[in-house]
Image: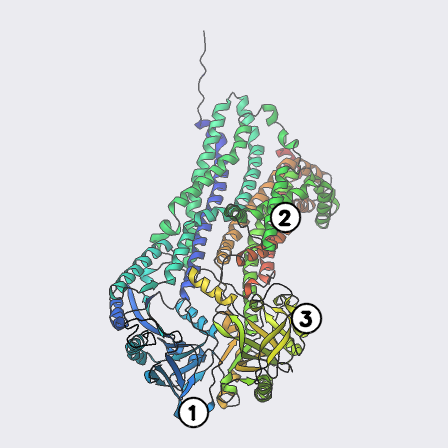
Amino acid sequence: MATTKQKQPVWPVMRIVGKNIFLIFSFVTFLVVAVLAATNVVSKYALMSYTEDQIGRFRWDGVVYQTKDVWEVENLQKALNGIAGISKTERVGIIKLAMGTQLAMKVGGAAVPLPWCVILSPNDPSRLPPQLRSSSGEVTLAFLSPQTILRSSMTDRASQFFQINYLDARTKNETPVFGTPFGHITQPERLEIVKWFLDEFGSGTFIPDQSVIVVLPKEKFDQELPRVFRLVNELSKPEAIVGNPDEGKGQTEPEGENLAASMFVEVMHLLSVDRSKLFSGWDLEGSRDRTSALIQNAATTAKRTSFESFVSSDLLVTLEKMSQVSRLVGLLTILISIPILWMAWHFTASLTRLVILNQRRLIGLLRLRGVSYSPIRQSLRLAIGMGGLLGGLAGALAGTLLPYGLYRISGVRIPLNLLFTTVQNPWFLAAFIVLGTTFSVLAGRKIIDYMAQITPLEASRRMASSEASLRFEFTTVHLFSLFVGGTKMAAWIIGYTPQTELLQRADMLLNFVAVPLFIYGVSALIVSRTRMLHAILDGLAHPVTGPLKWFAVTDMLSRPQRVMSTILVAALAFVVVVYPRVTADSFYEKALRGLRLNLGSDVAVRFDGATLTGGDLKAETIEWYAANVGRRVQEMEGKIKAMPGVRDVHAIYELSVPGTFYIPGKNYLQLYLIEDPEKFIRSVYYENKLGADRPFEQLVTALKKDELIISKGFASSFDSGDVRAKLLGIGRSASGSDVTSPIAGITYLLPGTPQLVVANRESYASAAVEFLNSISEINPYVVGRLNAKNLGPLNAFLTGVFLDVSVGDGNPDTITTLLNQLNKSGALPEIAAISTIEGESGKLGNDMFVRLGLENMKVFLIGGILVSLSAVIAIAIVNFIERRRTFGILRIRGASPAQLMRVVLAQMMVPVLIGGAIGVLAGLAAGYGLTNAIFSLPRVISILGILDVHLTVRTAVAGIVAGVLGIFFLATLSLSSWIFRRSAREALKHD
């Protein structure tokens, strides 16, 4: 009679073999998903804090520019105030007058032959640059072109009147257009004015270089604006053609020699909103949408009143950029977590071996009892799948709620209603669970394939036959990983960036996998070189194991795959906690060096040229300035150097030379004169990289009395060839003869002179970046010596004097206080500006990627160490289970438990030390390279693009490395103590 084969049930087998597997794989998936979820939360926090930091630098949330319909200024402001969501509006008015041949400026009745006048009305005079600020609230005149000839008699109280008149070309009559008394006169740097607009309004504006800036109170500006606008438009109409009155009648072509005046009006309506209702850093996309709707409403309202008005909002620009990043955070989380995932994979592999060792005898007994392959296979699949799914769900909750709780405890407010909507995007959270479950299922295939086909003979062995036959070889995959990872890290270090779009996309992906690939390749290379590995293990194990070194080293060499896994896991654990900190420190150090070069010293003091010449603004020879102003400057240097804590003082004279060069936006060349090259090098902070053709120190100290150093921007205007072979005609003497000088070399920057230093990228719109870059690229000047005989007859205008004060054992803030006291007492002339390193460094912005890396490091420090530590412990347990009979025999032969504990300790810690060394070195290289990569991203051109990145390793990095190493040591010590709690007989009996 034929018999039918009965189907064996799955659940009874599941209860026997699936319990431990379910727990193990749920734990693995829990760790993977928890790390991904926590990384996603802290990445959102990094974006939130970075965005809030950027937005916190904005004084205003939007600016409505009104360029026409000036009589509607009040109406437009009232309309903007009526928009729901706008809490406050203020106005800043700018009138830019191109004089042409029809308008002329006068100070005290004397002509001022400059082509531009800028009338400025600030909303808050106290926030003006110090050079434009008047302590008494009077009108300030600022001459951006030092070629204006003013005499002290013209600035007497009785003569302090500024006026603009219209000149009638036919009648020669003058019609007053604008006039005002003034009480303060100054010579600021144009760059300082541009910086003020950037700091105050978030965007630059065109400020003509050859101009007079008139700073008016708001009330007077509002009163004068309609009248000046009407007069200029009426009086500057084109004249009829000269000739017979009947000829050309009605034609409006201007005379060839007459250049009509023109007027450009900018009334900036500054918008302030209630950011607490509009903006949430945890909901960047929603914040962008709300801000966009409000700005669009303001634009529509403005156009109804003044059609040609337009709106600019750096708040909206920043939110648009950051919301784009926010949408990609889930993908970035997976890419950033690749090292952790790699560690988890090796952890899972170790657990797989542990499961095989613990479960194979049980599976063998089931097979002897008649259980078929099918229920075993199904129960294993079910256990792994359910464990992965439930572990993933638990990991998702833990990875979200744990950071949430910690942030709330630390005082960070996270809206609970946004926690599982925008903070933790549910789609990405589901993707993390699927990824973690798939991760477990793929890792569990080895168990399923092995257990479902195990034979009773295989089950009776002390170690799997597959384990006994394994050998480690350096394969093509290892070589590829080493080559790709090493090449990308080398590209970081040298600053190489691909040019084509396809290569840039591939390069972006490599940014996330380069370090793990490099570590994988290096670890494999070391383990595959048996002699080298033997020597390393022998040297590191000897101090711990003593006479049992032979056993510890031989046993490790018999399991090269596990040594490889331990080294790799430890290296990845160390690298993920080292490189973010190194990147942040190196980034900030470079930005701070750029700032120090800009200031030149710990304290930088600027004096206006008019202050040092007694009110005269006129062309004098360099000899005259050296004899008259130089004597006064030396007295000032002596008084400052006598202050306690001051090490040295050096002066830089800033002059303007009427030139014959074509320089866009200028009709003069900037000349800086230093007193003594060697004293200059001793007094200022510099870097040899500043020299374009040779080291900066060599360039300056070798500067002869008759030579000049020219800026890189100025050198670019020359024809190709050796610039030093040229003779530069710098200007003319008082008698009209040419003054020439040989060129000693080229510099990127003269320390102590004002430059743009911008370290962030997100705060400015693309148009503003292009504007700032145009300023930075066109910055021509020359550097010479004050006592140069060939420059003595040169006619020039003194713009100002910079005093670079080097602080010894003093405090810059104390020095600043003493300087202000000397200024108030009259011992020093009126100081135009004082800048310190401490004061300016607070303005430095951090970088988004740096902030993201630092926040992720907190997760990696916990999650990464937990995963790597679990992997190392799992490997150690597997090694002991396979070798416990051997350990028992060693104890019977006389080895003490303490000696065997040291063997286990060495077998765990020696590969960890090797991996730690690889990880720390790779972390240092990656941190240095990533800083280079960050500075190579598009940003405002400044001296930061010239400086090298310095590898900066602070004590915090050493503390982190020591802490991680200590955690590994304590864990392995505890494990080795637990392993040998039983006697040798019990170990043999259990085996």
Q: x, y (%) of residue 260?
A: 36, 74
Q: In the rendered picture of this protein, how many numbered marks are placed on residues?
A: 3
Q: Are marks 2 and 3 in contact (CB under 8 Å)?
A: no
Upstream in sequence: badge 2 or badge 3: 3
Quarter that holds the C terminus: top right
* Amino acid carrying mark 3 in the image: Gln
Q: Is residue 421 left or right of residue 372?
A: left
Q: Residues within 10 Å of mark 2 (few under 14, many from 20)?
A: many
Name which quarter of the figure residue 135 lies in: bottom left
* Amino acid carrying mark 1 in the image: Asp
Q: x, y (%) of residue 275?
A: 34, 63
Which residue position is annotated with label 1? 156
Looking at the rendered image, the disc whose residue lies closer to the viewer, 2 or 3, is: 3
Q: x, y (%) of residue 127?
A: 40, 76
Decide if residue 558 is in sight here. Answer: yes
Report the Cα–Cα distance between label 2 and label 3: 44 Å
In the depicted structure, whether residue 866 falls above or below residue 178: above
Which residue position is annotated with label 3? 698
Instruction: Tell me the element at label 1.
Output: loop
Q: Residues within 10 Å of mark 1 (few under 14, many from 20)?
A: few
Residue in the image at 62% along x and 30% along y:
466
Which residue position is annotated with label 2? 915
